[in-house]
Amino acid sequence: MQLVPRYLVNNTTIVVANMAGFITEYRPVYSKQLQVYKGIDNVLEFRTYNADQRPIDITSYTPKFVAFDETGQMILEKDCTILDDGSTVARGKFNVTIT
């Protein structure tokens, strides 16, 4: 019998924040679709960067996850959990759990 190891890796999505008030970056070519599966708790992890690709301190903000269908109807709105603890490793991280 052959043993096949599997590893669960966090798939982090990068969010570029418009903190300066002007258009910083928009690349639809590199955008990815987030996959959510039935029957399990899906944890989506995000990391917020500014225009200089540096992580932003988001402890004073409340991120929200909003999902729309193909027709533009909002189907889900959830508050996110901030993982930012003030250190440089976790700066700008937050996640949302979709059941």
Image (cartoon, rainbow, N blue to C red):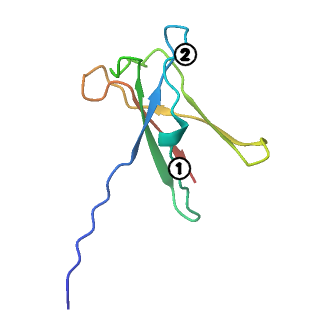
Dots 1, 2 in contact, CB < 8 A: no
> Which quarter of the figure has residue 93?
top left
User: How would you rate the neighbour count of disc 2 (Cα within 10 Å): few for under 14, some for 14-19, many for 20 or more?
Assistant: few
Q: Distance between the Cα atoms at labels 1 and 2?
A: 24 Å
User: Which residue sits at x=47%, y=14%?
Assistant: 60
Q: Return the residue found at the far left.
A: 2
Q: Earlier in the sequence, mark 1 or mark 2?
A: 2
Q: Secondary structure at mark 2?
A: loop
Q: Secondary structure at mark 1?
A: loop
Instruction: Kindly identify the amino acid type of the residue bearing the numbered disc 1.
Output: Leu
Q: Which mark is residue 34?
A: 1
The x and y percentages for residue 84 are 36, 26
| Quarter placement of the C terminus | bottom right
> Which quarter of the figure has residue 8?
bottom left
User: Which residue sits at x=50%, y=53%?
Assistant: 42
User: Which residue sits at x=30%, y=19%?
Assistant: 86
Relative to 12, residue 18 above or below: above
Q: Which mark is residue 7?
A: none
Relative to 41, residue 45 above or below: above
In the picture of the structure, the residue carrying the numbered disc 2 is 23
The x and y percentages for residue 34 are 53, 50
Asked if residue 22 lies left or right of residue 9, the reply is right
User: Which residue sits at x=52%, y=34%?
Assistant: 80
Relative to 85, residue 97 above or below: below
Q: Return the residue found at the far bottom.
A: 1
Asked whether 31 or 79 is in front, the reply is: 31
Depth check, mark 1 against mark 2: the one in front is 2
Relative to 2, residue 5 above or below: above
Instruction: Kindly identify the amino acid type of the residue bearing the numbered disc 2.
Output: Ile
* Count of labels in the image: 2
